[in-house]
Amino acid sequence: MPVIDITQLSYCYRENNPPVLQDVSLQIYSGQFVGIAGANNSGKSTLCYAMSGVVPHLFHGKFSGNVKINGISTLEHTVSDISNQVGLVLQKPDNQISGMRFTVFEEVALGLENRGFERETIRKRVSEMLNLMELSSHAERSPFHLSGGQQQRLALASVLAVDPPVLILDEPTTFLDPSGAFHLFSILQKLQKEGKTIIITEQRTDLLAAFTERVIVLQEGRVRKDGSPQNVLTTPDIETAGIGRTRYTKTAELAKKNSLWQTDHALPATLNETIAGLRIRKNTDDYKN
């Protein structure tokens, strides 16, 4: 059974507005690392809201279709119920900081306190999350005195503290530099290896190619492509959906035009695939000589 099962989902925020999502059907399975790509206004954020129950419970637009999380229908359960299954991390971390706690430690503990966990369990769990996010040295600081990257990791720690099996992140690297974005993806990859299902919307296709195992492309609220990064991110038509191909794909395409790439070898999406393809070409040339 898929951990997320979406059937013919359509949604618009106001009755007479054009739909933001149109006839979306998707199945995402436990332990997958899935990237969602698309231009601005392609429906990425709304899809995240639908998968976490924010749509239709907090945004009351026109909703049709069905979304199930571990067999639980989002239409039939509250956001509170769904939050035990899915954790949502927003694009702007300061929008997710409660403002109700004075320190980083207290902020991460808030969700656990609201769920009635024992004090010792809370202390242990918060310490683990701060250590994972490399925020232990900031435990007594105000959340609002952290950098943007630290605040993003704090938001992630707060969500992870309650241990949802599915983690959804809506463009969390928007305000991070390349180093910070890579670090965040590395943390997510570690979480996936520990059994979490990771779903992330992201504009940087290099990161999607390097870390995810599946990429879904949205265009005008519809699913246009769905497959492995190598199959999805190397095709020229994704640029018509407002997504740039990876630097490695473009490099290999240029090499192909200059007879430096094996013509029958697929274009790469990652650095390792590029190196492997160039080696194949070199070995072929060496053999001919």
Image (cartoon, rainbow, N blue to C red):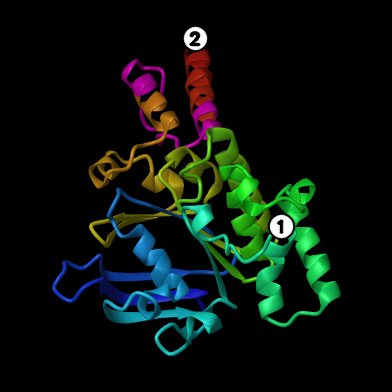
Residue 78 falls inside the magenta stretch: no
First along the sequence among labels 2 and 1: 1
Q: Callout 2, which amino acid?
A: Asn
Image position of 215 (left or right of 110) = left
Q: Is residue 27 above or below residue 249?
A: below
Seen from the viewer's position, the closer of residues 61 and 7 is 61
Identify the residue at horizontal 50%, vertical 84% (top origin). 71
Dot 1 falls on a residue whose secondary structure is loop
Q: Which residue is mark 2?
A: 289
Q: Is residue 70 visible?
A: no
Numbered tag placed on residue 258 in the rendering: none
Q: Position of residue 284 (x, y in %)?
A: 49, 20
Image position of 31 (left or right of 117) = left
Q: Callout 1, which amino acid?
A: Thr
* Label 2 to label 1: alpha-carbon separation: 67 Å
Q: Mark 1: give few (<14), some (14-19) or many (20+) Cα within 10 Å.
A: some
Q: Which residue is mark 1?
A: 103
Q: Position of residue 267 (x, y in %)?
A: 40, 34
Q: Position of residue 25 (x, y in %)?
A: 33, 71
Q: Position of residue 95 (x, y in %)?
A: 49, 58
Q: Is residue 108 above or below residue 231?
A: below
Residue 266 falls inside the magenta stretch: yes
Dot 2 falls on a residue whose secondary structure is loop
Seen from the viewer's position, the closer of residues 178 and 245 is 178
| Range drawn in magenta | 254-275
Identify the residue at horizontal 27%, vertical 81% (top origin). 64
Seen from the viewer's position, the closer of residues 13 and 215 is 13
Quarter of the image where one finds residue 224: bottom left
Image marks 2 and 1: residues in contact by CB distance under 8 Å? no
Q: Is residue 94 above or below residue 255?
A: below
